[in-house]
Image (spheres, rainbow, N blue to C red):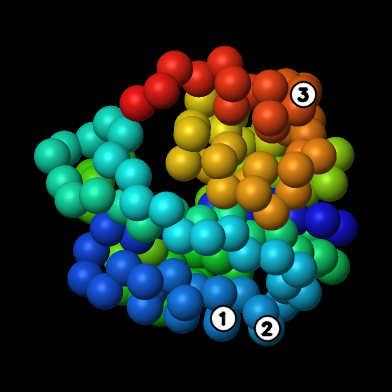
Amino acid sequence: MRAVIALGSNLGDRESYIQSALKEMATFLTIERVSTLIETEPVGGPPQGDYLNAVVLGECELEAEELLKKLMEIEKNLGRVREEINGPRTIDLDIISMGDLVIQSENLSLPHPRAHLRRFVLEPWLEVDPEAQLVGRGSVKELLRSIKPS
């Protein structure tokens, strides 16, 4: 199933953390495309440094909950500490969508409930998939147009 995963880092060697995460993800995800890294200001949370963000498209045979578990393991392996909501992090890995799945569980919401509001997700996603659609929201291109420039 096609998975769209957003990556972000704003602590330490940000690019190295993203590259390490991609390498680990390649053990369970057939990576098709990786966007250019973009630098963005943090959204919400305490004052903190800018992020490097990217989006990866890949094929995955795991169930959504299992994919989430694997991504959280990568975050832990790369030193992610969850002390405060929207706090700085070595690596952040979010499932944006998986095929046409719609899931609302205690651990996972698909598609990602705030993806349609996040330029740092939509821009790199559009780069790697110009025809991308966000389930329940429509064209990523149109969603991006509806976001006010930052």
Image coordinates of residue 125 in percent, x first then y, are 63, 46
Image coordinates of residue 134 in percent, x first then y, are 74, 32
Which residue was labeled with disc 1? 24
Which residue was labeled with disc 3? 138
- Quadrant assignment for the C terminus: top left
Q: CA distance from mark 3 to mark 1?
A: 31 Å
Question: Which of the two discs, 3 and 1, labels the residue nearer the N terminus?
Answer: 1
Q: Is residue 72 above or below residue 38?
A: below
Mark whose residue sits in front, 2 or 3: 3
The reply to whether discs 1 and 2 touch (Cβ–Cβ < 8 Å) is yes
Query: Left or right of 108: which side holds 82?
Result: left
Image coordinates of residue 95 in percent, x first then y, are 62, 50
- Which residue sits at x=34%, y=45%? 40
Quadrant of res 67? bottom right
Query: Left or right of 23: which side holds 10?
Result: left
Q: CA distance from mark 2 to mark 3?
A: 31 Å
Which residue was labeled with disc 2? 27
Q: Is residue 70 above or below residue 133?
A: below
**Callout 3 secondary element:** strand
Query: Left or right of 132: which side holds 116?
Result: left
